[in-house]
Amino acid sequence: TIYFAFATEYVNQQGVRSAQRVWLTSLPPGETEFGAPLEITDPEDVVGVYDQPAITVTPSGDLLITYGEAPPDLQTTTLVTQRSEDGGRTWTKDVPIPNDGPQYMNLFHPCVSPDSDRVYLLYLDADLGVALWRSEDGGQSFPAENRAPVAAEDESESMMVDGNCIAQGDEVLDWREMQARYAPAHVRLLEGGDHALSDFELHLPAVLAFLG
């Protein structure tokens, strides 16, 4: 079975968001079309955006979905896991990163070890850079001490200081905060634009030139 998790929302002409949802659909073996999507978020929750949903299947067969959840003011992002032990009919929501926990910056993608109960979360940590966060119980808990940088110690900040494209029209993040945070880096500041950098192909020549 192939599973696909995705987020939807409605944005009116004034740029106001509404009807934010996270969905799951699946393609069973032998089928040629995905089934009707199943909503896994609560439509009564008041949110600003659901960001980057991703899914994996644990060795025990449980479904684990991860995504970022921001309030209407978009000033913070909470990392969320949703876990189902019955094929997606019911879900248990958890927040593995409390306010006093690891400092999340971006990314939040799950992966599994096929020969054990280990589940990993790949994310960008303010202290460690790109990091793997390990669970020993199939994704039910993620102890803070089970984090490790992916890169060598002297390379952990390379993703933050090498180069960044920042759009002034980003509807999720404040471009001024991003510009201040990445001050040591080569920054390409774009007028307008959006969080997804939908016109990225226009900037690709400059990115390739920067990479050499």
Image: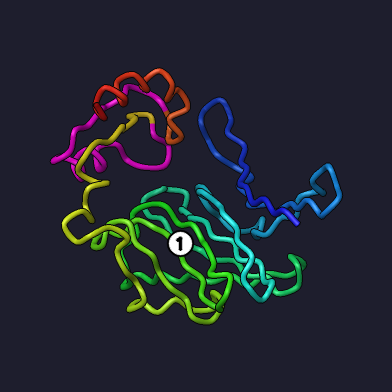
Callout 1: 10 Å neighbours few (<14), some, many (20+)?
many
Q: Residue at x 22, y 48 (%)?
A: 158
Q: Which image quadrant: the N terminus?
A: bottom right
Instruction: Give x and y (percent) for residue 161.
Output: 20, 43
Horizontal side of 87 relative to 73 (left or right) equals: right
Horizontal side of 82 relative to 73 (left or right) equals: right
Instruction: Give x and y (percent) for residue 53.
Output: 56, 52
Establish if 71 lies above or below 64: above
Establish if 193 lies above or below 158: above
The residue tagged 1 is: 79
Instruction: Give x and y (percent) for residue 36.
Output: 81, 48
Q: Which image quadrant: the C terminus?
A: top left
- For the image, the number of numbered tags is 1
Q: Residue at x 49, y 57 (%)?
A: 109
Q: Residue placed farthest to the bottom in the image?
A: 137
- Secondary structure found at label 1: strand
Asked whether 123 falls inside the magenta stretch, the response is no
Amino acid marked by disc 1: Leu
Q: Which stretch appears magenta?
A: 170-193
Q: Residue at x 24, y 36 (%)?
A: 163
